Image (cartoon, helix red, strand yellow):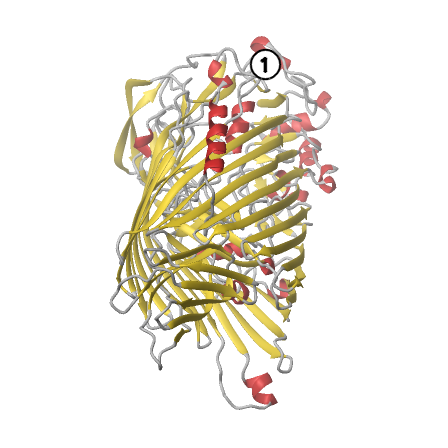
Amino acid sequence: MRSKLIASLWLCLILSVPVLAQSTGGLAGISGVLRDPSGAVIPGAKVVISSESLGTIRTLTTNEAGLFAAPALPPGQGYRVSITAAGFAGYELKDIVLQVGQNLDLNVSVAVATSTTQLEVTTAAPLVEDTKTNVSQVIDSQQITDLPINGRRVDSFVLLTPGVTNDGTFGMLTFRGVAGHNSFLVDGNDTTEQFYNENAGRTRIASQISQDAVQEFEVVSANYSAEYGRAMGGVVNTVTRSGSNQLYGTAYWFFRNQDFNARDRYASFNPAETRHQTGASLGGAIKKDKLFYFFNFDYTYRDFPLVSSYIRSGVLDPIGQTFIGCGAPATTSQCQAINGLLPRFYGTLPRTVTQDLALGRLDYHLSERNTLSASLNYQRFISPNGIQTGISNTGGGGVNSNGDDAVRVRQGRFAWTAIPTSSTVNEFRFGWSTDRQADTFDNSSLGQGLGLLGVSVNGVTLGPANYLPRVEPNETRYEFADNGSWTKGSHVIKFGTDIASAEDYTYFISNFFGSYTYQTVTNFALDYTDQGLSATNPGKHWQRYVQTFGQPVVDATIKDYGFYLEDQWRATSKLTVNLGARYEYAQLPQPSLFNHDYPQTGHIPTGNKNLEPRLGLAYRLNDKTVLRAGYGIFHARFIGSLIDNLYTNNGVLQTAVTLNNTNSTQLAAGPTFPNSLAGAPTGGSVGAASLQFMDPHARTPYSEQGTLALERQVGNDTAVTASYIWSRGVQLMGVRDLNLPPLSSTTFTYAVDDANGNQVGSYTTPMYLGTTRPDPRYGGINQDENGINSYYNALAVQVRKRFSHGFQADVSYTWSHEIDDGQGGGSGALFFSNAFNYTYNGNFKFDKGSGQLDQRHRLVFSFVWLPTFTHRGGAINKYLVNNWEFSGITTMASGRPYTAMVNVLDTPVPGMFSNFSLNGSGLGGRVPFWPVNSLYTPPGYRSDVRLSKIVPFGETKHKMYLNFEVFNVSNTIADTSINTQAYTEKGGVLTLTPAAYGQGLGASGFPDGTQARRAQVSIRFTY
């Protein structure tokens, strides 16, 4: 019934709206008001908006309010606005650069026509947008082409924007301290991967789209209009290049090797590396002013061996590459045998990347009132041993958590823009995309060691990754959107709908081949070799055995519906009001198999209270100063990975068997090393499985956002903006274990000692007591519920100088503070399969404090400079003295927080449910008397620069660029991970370990897997 209602609403909306359009779906717009010298509006004037290079022309007539509006214009350079009105001097604005998402608003005053005043010509468009109410920035083609960029991954430039910073060290982004939940668009179409809620292909690939195929992109970080949806964080809207009446193109080659690289701090040597990136693009007109084309091909090859080692104090000798502590009853030969498993963890492991990118686009102007556009983007990424991307790995991950990675992305788009009348515009879009990510074992390593079997010995993992093979996901997305505008009086009314379907096919089952855990090295040695040498329990000296049985395939489809209505009202000559609302609904799949013990596993609730009011105000104090304010509600999209977990963690579709040697029945039912079980044992021989389901009353998480900004144009080319940004995350997902014993009234007081063993305090906590769970048939019964909130406050200052006189610059500073109840980062806000983030079960407020995504200070400076050293002619001045280009990006940022942890070594309180945490809950093991996230990594400083020599070919526009780029010029390294173990508990005493906690463990960097200095040379032709 509900789905029929939604479909009916959508159909009625389409049929009842003669026109639907917008300026933000990868497009732009120009609007304005025409007045006479007295300030009275001038109706009936003719307005012609044109671009000779793009073949675009739009003819309008000012209405009774003197207003004209031309939405749905393709972004580009060389626009011209010409206005003629009877009895008045003409007006012309030339050389306009129109950017994606921009609505260039013109307040035009024309004089009465005289014999000397017939035409007023202006060449400088306003820099301050007096109808804009959101917090956004456009990264233009000049910045994309000329700024230094490591790896040519163009979405890295998003970090130039205030209010945006890194989410972890793997290329993810956070807007306003929100963990994930961003939306990524290409030419207005939603290309966000629904499963992981990231950009298509995720961040392991070199890029989703070639840098040379991108014209520009808009980053909307707060208070976006009702046209945008399915994003609680921010929006990144990329616009691809299109053809024009002028033939143009590029060809390029980028190269680097180890001779350009500095050594990673955590690598014992600088490994060999070779990288080639090459490609070409071509754009032009098949038929002038009618049919245009653009094509790009990009190829990347990278050979970057992984420096592998395994550091495990007290268990491994990394120098001798042997186990420590192996002895009787194991024989010498048995101990020597297991040492043969270790050499493969030390040295360099072969690893390569091969990626192909191709994009083709056609634009067809059927007439002045109808335009068609279509594009297809292709991406293929293959990386043997490429799951681990860091330059070095000191925890054995190069072998025990690695494999071959393959990603394939296809994106297709069709758009039709129709202009029935001068006051109405309709834009229809269709999008299709596939995103397939498949990982498997690397065949070259399977012949060594333990094959497919998982083995862990006193914390040392010897087997391969227990999550392989997997396809997560194979996603197919379809999107239909119809959006539009109608100009009536002083109102520009926008409304529309979009419907998206995302099907996620996954193949994943953890520990499918079985995993053994051994408490001691000796026990493993007894089982690894001839079991006959062991007098007791031959082949069964393991402590725990885990294997999962069941169905590895999940095929689930999420359907998203969105409807919006927005009115941009020019309330006065100075005040613009944007008032809108959006409603979203997600139709979620339901499991066909569920656990009858817990019927909640058979239903995934759909939140339907997803109304999103949006309000924006822009007040023009004068022609160069605008005051803006805004407020809105923005809901998150439902993540496919959570759907996948809710399907598989019901104890029916997949069954995880855990057998412990402390239970004689389970030990007897377990396999003899190195065998696996052919089927799941039943009855009392099976360890309790955990369950996961949604709270039946769960609602869709959302954020409230508010902004206040003042923008001032200084001179002709510079604007200064000061903004206050506020955001609150509401009803974010948390996890409660319904099968945990209740918190008792029994308390225990721990002594707190300093590092020298002197007591300096105490800590008292109530305890979780009990030897069994309330429902002994199961382990954790994890309910996903709306329990978390977040709070973000920021002050941002930005200075922008657009390109003029050979110089362009952008400086932004953001002070911010993010507080939450245990939100975590984007990579952790996906599956919600356990409650390990929290100290007390269900008491989320106890862990309130500075969030994992908190970063107090961030300063970013970027510039492009083309100096002219002399105006004299001659070959020497042309080819040697002049035609140089300098550019750079400098980032200074505060360190990131970590939570201090305590290592519990025994059971200080008899009867405590678990000895993993001080209160016996077995959940979070943080130091509870310290604030959360009280340890910080060092602040970061990085400067990337590019030096280019431009060689022009004669008097034509053909040029060759010889480039040299250095990333992290000063080779300044800041640890990104630190040792968080601050205390050790033994015998009811907590002892500080200052020599360990806070010390650096790694200095990862994106996209190279290291922060160490990198450099490259390149050659580029433009024509």
Residue 515 x %, y %? 62, 27
Inspect this view and state whether residue 716 appears: yes
Instruction: From the viewer's side, name the closer residue of 831 and 109.
Output: 109
Position of residue 757 in the picture relative to residue 272 (left or right)? left
On screen, residue 613 above or below 970: above
Instruction: From the viewer's side, name the closer residue of 974 and 691.
Output: 691
Residue 189 x %, y %? 53, 45
Position of residue 946 in the picture relative to residue 824 (left or right)? right
Residue that protrudes farthest toward the top in the picture: 683
Q: How many numbered marks are there?
A: 1
Q: Quadrant of residue 535?
A: top right
Q: Residue at x 62, y 31 (%)?
A: 505
Instruction: From the viewer's side, name the closer residue of 52 and 922.
Output: 52
Inspect this view and state whether residue 523 appears: no
Position of residue 812 in the picture relative to residue 556 (left or right)? left
On screen, residue 579 above or below 77: above
SS label for mark 1:
helix
Residue that protrudes farthest toward the front in the picture: 86
- The amino acid sitting under disc 1 is Gln
Q: Residue at x 37, y 54 (%)?
A: 894
Q: Residue at x 49, y 76 (%)?
A: 866
Position of residue 568 in the picture relative to residue 890 (left or right)? left
Instruction: From the viewer's side, name the closer residue of 919 and 818.
Output: 818
Quadrant of the drawing holding the C terminus: bottom right
Residue 553 x %, y %? 63, 26
- According to the picture, the residue beneath numbered tag 1 turns out to be 666
